[in-house]
Image (cartoon, rainbow, N blue to C red):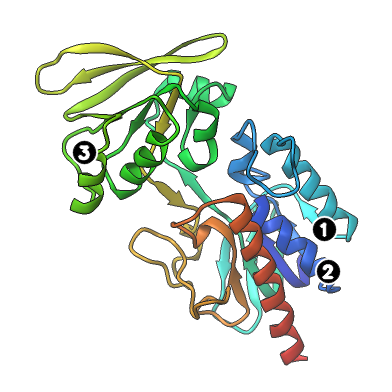
């Protein structure tokens, strides 16, 4: 029989949301247990430079920030486990969760901070420069600043892609937008990029390869799916805006999700889900902002909501 561990607060996932929730929950003497998940530290561990998080005037690397947040959570005696939760049962008053190491956890409160994973094209060259931190990104708002005055390429056809292309156009000398077929964006967003002088839109265009050298990205090799013409586009930044996949699959039988898998807030202005005692923080519920600072803010909210829930019960 597996070991049963009883806790006041279980935090599923790390990153800015999870670690902030842990700091607040631990300081409130909730003795939180955290399972870090498949990617300890979340998406920020793949971010080379973070310059927009308050308190770091010189900037900080994503991995370094996550180490510091983890150390702060540990300072207040959060119990942090590597590994992940792979099954939950939220049908009763006690929330049952099972970890990949066989541990069964009975938690009075659960904070979900499993985040969302950016979708990429899956090209080996794209992954190479993503891992290298040398010019591939899935967040224009996070990384566009590094490409001021340079030429960039963005892949995508929806509202988010148009929004990010428009954002880049204010910083970059030129933005080339690669649209696989036609726009899926709303007319207002599509019209905005069409009217922006330094955005060139290439329809029916797919990426064959991200080009680069030891210093990073130097261009993108693309093909027109109708004419079969192949050409190279010079760029130093290659942005992918084809959506995110929230990491919420294990909760779908108990937690209300929207049509794309994001967790729905039960009550606006809180972190509450439809299950009493289960709260959500960060990108698992946020498809609008997706920033480290907003994730941290909702981590704080989730811990405070969980603390109030426990206080009302006892």
Are the residues tagged 1 and 2 within 8 Å (C-beta)?
yes
Q: Residue furthest left?
A: 227
For the residue labelled by badge 3, is the local secondary structure a helix, a strand or a loop?
helix
Q: Where is residue 132 in the image (x, y as percent from the top left)?
A: 58, 21
Q: What residue lies at 85% left-to-right and 68% top-to-bottom?
A: 27
Q: What residue lies at 35% left-to-right and 41% top-to-bottom?
A: 166
Q: Which of marks 1 and 3 is in front?
A: 3
Q: Where is residue 136 in the image (x, y as percent from the top left)?
A: 48, 27
Circle 2 sits on which residue?
31
For the residue labelled by badge 2, is the local secondary structure a helix, a strand or a loop?
loop
Mark 3 surroundings within 10 Å by alpha-carbon count, few (fewer than 14), some (14 through 19), many (20 or more) = some
Mark 1 surroundings within 10 Å by alpha-carbon count, few (fewer than 14), some (14 through 19), many (20 or more) = some
**Residue nearest the viewer, comparing 159 with 245:** 159
**Residue nearest the viewer, comparing 137 with 41:** 137
- On the rendered structure, is 105 left or right of 280? right
The dot on residue 194 is: 3
The dot on residue 79 is: 1
Residue 314 visible in the shown view = yes
Q: Where is residue 146 in the image (x, y as percent from the top left)?
A: 55, 29
- On the rendered structure, is 33 left or right of 113? right
> Which badge, 2 or 3, is on the more N-terminal residue?
2
Residue 1 visible in the shown view = no
Q: What residue lies at 44% left-to-right and 61% top-to-bottom?
A: 262
Q: Position of residue 300 (x, y in %)?
A: 69, 67
């Amino acid at each position: 029989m597996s070991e049963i561990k009883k806790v006041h607060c279980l935090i599923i996932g790390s990153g800015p949301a999870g670690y902030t929730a842990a700091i607040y929950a631990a300081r409130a003497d909730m003795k939180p247990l955290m399972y870090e998940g498949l990617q300890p530290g979340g998406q920020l561990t793949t971010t080379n430079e973070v310059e927009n998080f308050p308190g770091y005037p010189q900037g900080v690397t994503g991995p370094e920030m996550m180490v510091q947040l983890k150390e702060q959570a540990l300072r207040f005696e959060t119990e942090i486990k590597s590994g992940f939760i792979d099954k939950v049962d939220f049908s009763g008053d006690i929330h049952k969760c099972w970890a990949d190491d066989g541990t069964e956890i009975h938690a009075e409160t659960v904070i979900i901070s499993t985040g969302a994973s950016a979708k990429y094209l899956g090209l080996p060259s794209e992954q190479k420069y993503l891992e290298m931190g040398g010019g591939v990104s899935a967040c224009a708002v996070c990384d566009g600043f590094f490409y001021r005055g340079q030429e960039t390429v963005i892949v995508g056809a929806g509202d988010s892609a148009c929004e990010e292309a428009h954002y880049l156009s204010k910083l970059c000398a030129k933005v080339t937008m690669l649209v696989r077929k036609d726009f899926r964006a709303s007319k207002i967003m599509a019209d905005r990029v069409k009217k922006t002088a330094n955005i060139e839109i290439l329809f029916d265009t797919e990426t064959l390869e991200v080009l680069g050298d030891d210093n990073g990205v130097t261009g993108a090799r693309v093909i027109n799916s109708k004419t079969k013409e192949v050409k190279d586009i010079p760029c130093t930044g290659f942005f992918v805006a084809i959506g995110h996949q929230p990491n919420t699959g294990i909760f779908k039988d108990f937690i209300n999700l929207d049509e794309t898998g994001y967790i729905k807030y039960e009550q606006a202005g809180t972190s509450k889900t439809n299950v009493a005692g289960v709260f959500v923080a960060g990108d698992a519920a946020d498809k609008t902002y997706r920033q480290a600072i907003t994730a941290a803010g909702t981590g704080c909210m989730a811990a405070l909501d969980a603390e109030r829930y426990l206080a009302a019960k006892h």
